[in-house]
Image (tube, grey):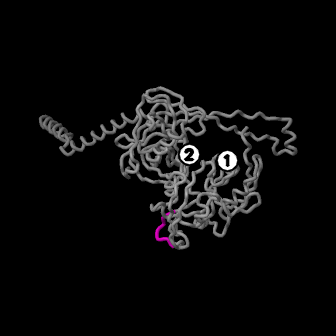
Amino acid sequence: MRKFFILLGIVGILWSADARAFTKEEEKAIAQVEALNKAFAAVAKRVIPSVVVIETMGKMKRVEIPSPFEEWPFGEFWKKFFEFPKPPPGVRRGLGSGVIVEGGDGKKYILTNNHVVRGADKITVVFYDGREEKAKVRGRDAETDLAVLEMKTQDVEGLPFGDSDKLRVGEIVLAVGNPFREYHTLTMGIVSAKGRSGLRLPEGPTYQNFIQTDAAINPGNSGGPLVNIRGEIVGINTAIQTKPTVGGYMGICFAIPSNMAKDVLEEIVQTGRVVRGFLGVRIGDVDRDMADALGLKEKKGAIVTEVIEGGPSEGKLRKGDVILKVDGKEVEDAAHLQRTIAKYEPDTRVELTIWRDGRRHKVRVKLGERPPREDLVEGKPETFKKLGIEAQALTKDLAERLGYEGEEGVVVTSVEPGSPADEKGIRRGDLIQEVGGKKVRSVREYEAALKNIKPGQAVLFLIRRGEHTFYVALRVPQEEK
């Protein structure tokens, strides 16, 4: 019996040894994975030293504390005798990433997101080897959310640009950044989609043509590179899709295409700013119902919702025109038209193929120069922005979805956290019907109603929410002193 168990043990050992051996096919597969591992390691070795930490410091706005005598009878009288000190402004610190690139003039620069350095009074760059340096902004472009920083250090390697137009859905990409000062991150994913637009981001870019990836991008990774398997920049990491209940990473991340970033970099290095063509119209997308209503076969092109007075297209285009082509090239949607026109130099004459009154027409327009972004915020007065409300016209589709059929007003599309509108409970989807006793039937009427409201003054809003209407008084914040 003892010999039997010894023999059984020997057989078991031999069997398990045989089970642990790999077949030729398995060995071949493992070798392929090992080659892939070596490729990733080689990319990491090349890319990581070219990624920097960007630390920023800036002043925070003073928080105004209302006087306790505000609601008292003769409140202004009592406030003269009991002056409450105003708290000093605080300091806002930020952390982001950047990538070292060649600027085309023989010098190296740092490419990052505009939102990483926006409002910064002091910018410190920390290199991979631990060296630190104060950097300054060479130029910023809020329209694409990109910024270029100048640096004295030049004995560092920059990363080359890849061609983002050739990037394919399904390709492997790596996201590199420094979400914390002490260490960097390198994450792998694939390209999920290209040409993403319509993202609602805080002070987000106008020109959106994002690469979507599931490579993990965390807060602090903004401004870092998205690279391909050859270690070439194919995007600049910018935003993530998130929910407060889920946390930071949900597997949906966005990067600015490298071709767009490279164009912005070259213009900023050469002139310190980005110059774009300007058509002088406000536009919207054409959906299936709109195409049917206008007699179009496809839901392509961009519909003109407003011709800006005194702009390049005044007298050439009309409200309701659908722009189908620019110089013979088809227009996919409003975002595509924006990007197409932006690539032209000011004073360039372009031929537009438009749809008007059921027929195609051709119109030539001499482009102007696109004004600074702050002059193009839909004509919003300062009051409009300070209240913390973004609003749009009540379209037929919105009216049906929100239950406002037959109503007039403007729909709240977003409310800034901490703003007067947020504090008074105004929500996205609310319908603003009156401002200061005046009916508002369009965004223009809404802006006009707010135009003469001064800081410190309160204005009454009539809001409809579902089947109920109510009044809300919003006070415009005082100017910071």
The residue identified by callout 1 is 419
x and y, in percent, of residue 478 in the image: 74, 43
- 474 left or right, relative to 180: right
Question: Of the residues shown, which amino acid type is indicated by label 1?
Answer: Ser
x and y, in percent, of residue 207 in the image: 52, 51
Taking the spot 62% from the left edge, 59% from the top edge, the residue there is 308
x and y, in percent, of residue 410 in the image: 66, 60
Question: Of the residues shown, which amino acid type is indicated by label 2?
Answer: Ala
Mark 2, other Cα within 10 Å: few <14 / some 14–19 / many ≥20: many
Q: Is residue 150 highlighted in magenta? A: no
Local SS, label 1 = loop
Q: Is residue 297 highlighted in magenta? A: yes
- 18 left or right, relative to 87: left
The residue identified by callout 2 is 142
CA separation in Å, label 1 and label 2: 22 Å
Q: Nearer the viewer, residue 307 or 42?
A: 307
Q: Are marks 1 and 2 in contact (CB under 8 Å)?
A: no
Mark 1, other Cα within 10 Å: few <14 / some 14–19 / many ≥20: some
Bounds of the magenta segment: 295-301
Local SS, label 2 = loop
Taking the spot 70% from the left edge, 62% from the top edge, the residue there is 440
Q: Quadrant of residue 2?
A: top left
- 88 left or right, relative to 278: right
In the picture, which quadrant includes the C terminus?
top right
Count of marks overlaid on the render: 2
